[in-house]
Amino acid sequence: MHRYSYTLLFLILGCSVFTGCDKYLDIQPKGKTLLSTVNDYDQWLNAPSLANSFGAPFGYTNFMTDNVDFVNAATPPTTPQELLYTWSLQFTSDVVSAPVLWGEHYAHINHYNTVVLGIDMATNGTGSQRRALRAEALLGRSLEYFYLVNEYGNPYDSMTAGKDLAVPFVTSNDVTQTVPGRSTVDEIYKHIIDDTNEALADLPVNNSMNRLRGSRAAAYSLLARIYFYARNYTEASKNAELALNNTQATMINLNGPLPTSDQVGVRPDVIYGRFVLGNFPAALDFMRSFAGNDLRVTRMYYSLDNYQYTTRGATSFIPLQVTPSLQYVNTGTSIQEMKLIIAENAARNGELSVALQQLDDIRKNRFAASSYVPFQSSDKDEVLEEVLLERNHELAFSGLRWFDMRRLDKENRMGTVTRYDANGNVIATLPPHSSRYTLQIPTQVLSFNPGMPQNP
């Protein structure tokens, strides 16, 4: 593959999104070993920054979805949130600050690469411990590349993925080295599938004590998500089944007792956890799509118009206001995501009983028990539409809706998304098949790497 003389300066920029870039980077002099023991590497993987997902604290890709309505967004937009909300070409002109999304992902990748490259030389540990930590690092790196390829590469299309440019695949943690040019979408998908499969055998069987860390079920769940967005629904469903069969996670029933802790790492339904803070103004059409007895509304949305959905900006997805223990949104994998993957594959294949059972498994935990009626239909298209609607309701602000919009746009299932100012004037539109479904490479990256090809 053609290589460019890019430096890793964008990784240095990205490192600034860490909280202090970890004490190891602060106290060890240049040229000295930063990590030496197995315990050092284990604690390195506990860095709080790694638990934050795609644009902390809120999850920047959520701002681009059709579920959000910023009534008072400035015209023209100025903040990163407003620029994302209106699908601007760039989210800042500041070439000094860390690039939104890109910088965070590559900083995390640099963190994981440090483990992959150094763990074999660690002391005071067993071979199995070293292999397990390396496997966790490969898994974490795969998750970061999953986000990158779905942000900066075109939506997966088997006809074009071998030509569509994505992102550089960086396996070094040395900022003085050159890095490869932009790999194709297909190459990045292959890398993350291969790395995740390689990690599987050495991962812990159970991560229930801290679901922010890796496990075999976590790897299967990530493979399910990866295949799902490659639109290989059969393989996605197979891996989702394996994830469910290998996890001790259990779904939360909104009819019953809710978690007492707000920590995603111990939340019962999490398989492989990451998190952002839930705080988004919800679009009226989105809120109107919920059934009246759907408990997710009153458990996770705060309304100033008594849940009538007549006033723009009156209803927000902000669990902190109504259910503080759910204030952090799991952007990692979960029991319900796996069930929705199985349901969608089954609906697409006409296996309606399977799809309906998976739907029922989720919805009976989400609707008021006293009035719940399982959804029934013998119409394949109707069942698929219900699965897609349920997916949007359940995973609305988990960071996946933007990726779903891209995926569904490839199937001509997305109409034009429109943004309005406070007076109802159109300020931005996202038409079907828009190039804006793929983010441009950040200005900061191109300023250090002027030869890197830009997206349209």
Image (spheres, grey):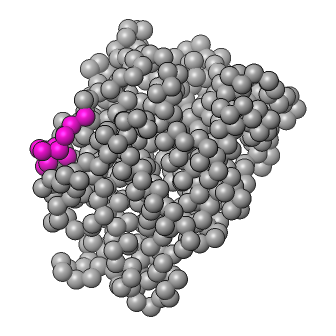
Locate residue 8, reporting x and y percent: 19, 58
Residue lying furthest front: 159
Q: Nearer the viewer, residue 129 or 239?
A: 239
Magenta-drawn stretch contains 447: yes
Q: Which residues are magenta?
A: 445-455
Q: From this view, report whether residue 402 is shown above or below residue 70.
A: below
Q: From this view, report whether residue 356 is shown above or below residue 272.
A: above
Q: Nearer the viewer, residue 249 or 223?
A: 223
Image-based side of 112 in relation to 172, left or right: right
Image-based side of 340 in relation to 43, left or right: right
Residue ID at (22%, 83%) = 32
* Quarter of the picture holding the C terminus: top left
Q: From this view, report whether residue 22 is shown above or below residue 446.
A: below
Residue ID at (36%, 85%) = 121
Residue ID at (55%, 60%) = 219
Is residue 354 visible in the rendered structure shown here? Answer: yes
Q: What main secondary structure does the magenta stretch of the protein show?
A: loop
Locate residue 324, reporting x and y percent: 62, 46
Residue ID at (55%, 29%) = 316
